[in-house]
């Protein structure tokens, strides 16, 4: 463990976190901090914006400029922050409920604009903070507090959603592979344009308990057989991919202009029109 | 010397905002506020400002708050349906003391109502719209020129007190054209938010020990600011529910910073012929113009009428009004709703004073003759 990262970036006096033992959020946060550390950018220009949920609580332990906003609204606040000061590296920390249900509209429109934000979703396939209800990423058939006969709503694949909405960097990472998660987040942070990283994670206290998946360690081991890399997935049939989670880098392209850059062109046009 | 120009209320609002330094606007089109967006989209990029048409009103005010945290003067404009959507994020701006200006151009509600028809039915919403207790600064101009000057005052109050300010007017004022004085930029008194001095490490984004306004540092300059909608201490970090004094202290500060400055710098109202008035008409915004004519006509008839017109609507000047109305025998409230201003005024009058309501909520403006009739009716009252 690299203790430097903790003393450097965490608000240590706010410890311990409110997270349950074994919660996946800590692994994601650690990966983010390691990735930020490797970036070699002015740390004072790195800002974190989150919504509401166990995952969004992550910012409350950080020694950076942070905004802990309302449920679902992190991307909206982040958009204003970035447009008001494009020099900032704006990182949105969010949950599956926060960004895909109540904040879903902001998510797709940020992707459509291709604004240079990095959105990191701690996807534990349920609403942890409110006690384990089903979310837009809960697999069909799961037990949650609001699907006691098994969840029946079809879930989103957040990577497909953000890709089709226009995100120019899309990846899925998993807490089971923390080093690879750090790498994917680092690439997302370096990407110019909207980057989205779906972090497959666990909520042992609620989703795990309600679905009798064992303790945090046992839940972690379940990922071993379920995770399939993009490369490997290419050689598997649709049946073989059922119940698997494909991880890796889905999109990494620079064929679309970034929104702050587009807006700078708009300013140039406006000035030309005013003077012309 | 500036110049005299003819423009609409919405145009005056957008141009005044830009004149006093607003450089970030985010909005979602809605009648009768849309022109503010349209004008900002044209003019802001000419001065390196940002205009954003957002996906909805929740994101519009969210982006405005985000931009203000980056140090920009920011504004959004909407009407009832959009203003309703903004309430939760507005509460975040109150508790985190983020300056921003929200324009609510009132149309007839409730719900979709009648998009092009005026109303004055959001007066209470601007006070109690977001959940939980919070202070308010709400301004109600009554002419195009006043929209211009009060938009500037809205920004000044917002920056000075680190507080969202709502500018509230109706569809008529939004779309009517009037000749107004447009000052030169150097004639405008512009207040910018105080910035912190001293060590960045020791800076606290909040101050709850007294009523003083804490300077606001912008994001991205090494202060490591922390803002949260949760109950927080002076560091901005959330405090635990075990510390139950927290919210009491926070709210005490939020209220005190406005209350302490109210009489000297925030309160604003127009008094017209009130010195010897038997009948006081209380009216705001567009309706106050008919009310003024009605008062003049009543005087011509020998009735001692006067007008009390709050310009800073919230906080309402209860103390002043209760002094002003000590000797009058009746108060007439005239407003385009079912009685919101009336409810406020009730607090300040005696049981032996008569209260007459003139309300219209069919989407028509209230005519001077209708208010005059209410004055005549009130004048018949024997104390
Ligand atoms: C407007 C609003 N509606 C509902 C809530 C209650 N609420 C808080 S967190 C949450 C769900 C969070 O789920 P997710 O984003 O997946 O975060 P997690 O706790 O699972 O990390 C809900 C519904 C709220 N705070 N605000
Ligand atoms: S409830 Fe679930 S998501 Fe929330 S802290 Fe506990 S384990 Fe993590
Ligand atoms: Mg979740």
Image: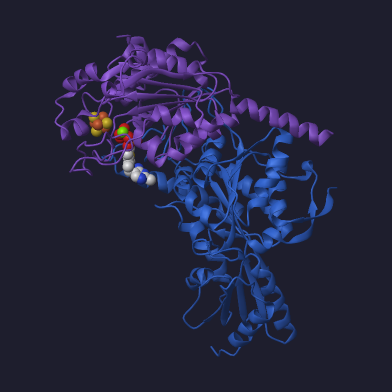
* Residue A104 point in image, percent of width and height: 43, 38
Q: Residue at x 53, y 32 (%)?
A: A112
Left or right relative to B312: residue A78? left
The quarter of the picture showing ligand 3: top left
Does residue A38 lie above or below A87 as drawn? above
Left or right relative to B295: residue B163? left
Does residue B278 lie above or below A276 as drawn? below
Q: Quadrant of residue A83?
A: top right
As drawn, the chain in blue is B
Q: Residue at x 47, y 30 (%)?
A: A164
* Residue B128 point in image, percent of width and height: 45, 57
Q: Is residue A53 visible?
A: no
* Residue B369 point in image, percent of width and height: 68, 81
Scheme by which the image is coloured: by chain
Q: Residue at x 19, y 38 (%)?
A: A143
* Residue A85 point in image, percent of width and height: 59, 28
Left or right relative to B129: residue A151? left
Q: Is residue A134 visible?
A: yes
The residue closer to the viewer here, B51 or A96, is: A96
Does residue A73 lie above or below B312 as drawn? above
Total marks in image = 0
As drawn, the chain in purple is A
Q: Quadrant of residue A63?
A: top left
The residue closer to the viewer here, B258 or A13, is: A13
């Amino acid at each position: 463990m690299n203790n430097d990262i903790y003393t450097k970036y965490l608000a240590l006096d706010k410890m311990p976190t409110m997270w349950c033992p074994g919660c996946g959020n800590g692994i994601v946060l650690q990966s983010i901090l390691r990735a930020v550390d490797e970036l070699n950018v002015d740390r004072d220009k790195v800002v974190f914006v989150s919504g509401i949920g166990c995952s969004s609580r992550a910012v409350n332990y950080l020694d950076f400029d942070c905004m802990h906003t309302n449920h679902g609204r992190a991307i909206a606040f982040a958009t204003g922050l970035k447009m008001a000061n494009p020099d900032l590296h704006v990182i949105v920390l969010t949950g599956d409920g926060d960004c895909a249900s109540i904040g879903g509209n902001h998510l797709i429109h940020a992707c459509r604009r291709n604004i240079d934000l990095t959105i990191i979703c701690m996807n534990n396939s349920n609403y942890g903070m409110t006690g384990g209800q089903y979310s837009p990423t809960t697999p069909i058939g799961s037990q949650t507090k609001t699907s006691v006969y098994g969840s029946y709503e079809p879930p989103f694949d957040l990577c497909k959603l953000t890709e089709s909405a226009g995100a120019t960097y899309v990846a899925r990472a998993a807490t089971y592979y923390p080093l690879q998660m750090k790498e994917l987040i680092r690439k997302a942070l370096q990407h110019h344009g909207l980057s989205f990283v779906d972090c497959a994670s666990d909520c042992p206290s609620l989703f795990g308990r309600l679905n009798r998946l064992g303790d945090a360690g046992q839940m972690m081991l379940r990922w071993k057989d379920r995770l399939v890399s993009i490369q490997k997935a290419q050689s598997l049939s649709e049946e073989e991919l059922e119940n698997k989670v494909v991880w890796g880098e889905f999109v990494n392209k620079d064929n679309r202009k970034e929104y702050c850059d587009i807006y700078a062109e708009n300013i140039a046009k406006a000035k030309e029109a005013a003077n012309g | 010397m500036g110049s005299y120009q003819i423009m609409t209320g919405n145009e005056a609002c957008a141009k005044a905002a830009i004149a006093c330094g607003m450089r970030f606007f985010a909005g979602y089109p809605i009648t009768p506020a849309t022109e503010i967006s349209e004008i900002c989209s044209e003019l802001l990029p000419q001065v390196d400002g940002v205009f954003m048409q957002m996906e909805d009103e929740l994101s519009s005010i969210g982006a405005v708050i985000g931009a203000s945290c980056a140090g920009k003067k920011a504004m959004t404009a909407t009407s009832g349906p959009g203003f309703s959507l903004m309430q939760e994020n507005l509460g975040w701006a109150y508790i985190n003391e983020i300056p921003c200006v929200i324009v609510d151009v009132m149309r007839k509600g409730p719900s979709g109502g009648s998009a092009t028809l005026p109303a004055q039915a959001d007066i209470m919403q601007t006070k109690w719209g977001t959940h939980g207790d919070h202070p308010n600064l709400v301004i109600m101009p009554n002419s195009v020129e006043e929209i211009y000057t009060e938009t500037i005052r809205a920004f000044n109050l917002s920056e000075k007190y680190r507080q969202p300010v709502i500018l509230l007017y109706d569809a008529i004022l939004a779309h009517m054209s009037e000749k107004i004085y447009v000052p030169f930029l150097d004639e405008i008194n512009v207040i910018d938010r105080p910035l912190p001095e001293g060590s960045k490490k020791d800076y606290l984004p909040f101050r709850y020990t007294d009523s003083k306004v804490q300077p606001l540092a912008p994001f991205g300059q090494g202060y490591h600011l922390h803002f949260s909608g949760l109950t927080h201490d002076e560091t901005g970090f959330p405090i635990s529910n075990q510390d139950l004094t927290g919210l009491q202290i926070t709210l005490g500060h939020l209220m005190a910073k406005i209350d302490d400055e109210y009489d000297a710098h925030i309160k604003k109202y127009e008094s017209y012929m009130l010195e010897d008035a038997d009948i006081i008409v209380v009216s705001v915004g567009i309706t106050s113009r008919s009310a003024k004519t009605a008062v003049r006509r009543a005087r011509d008839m020998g009735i001692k009428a006067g007008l009390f017109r709050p310009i800073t609507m919230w906080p309402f000047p209860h103390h002043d009004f209760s002094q002003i109305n000590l000797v009058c025998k009746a108060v007439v409230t005239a407003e385009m709703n079912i009685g919101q201003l009336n409810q406020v005024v009730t607090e300040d009058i005696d049981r032996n004073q008569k209260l007459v309501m003139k309300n219209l909520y069919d989407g028509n403006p209230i005519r001077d003759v209708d208010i005059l009739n209410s004055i005549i009716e009130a004048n018949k009252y024997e104390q």
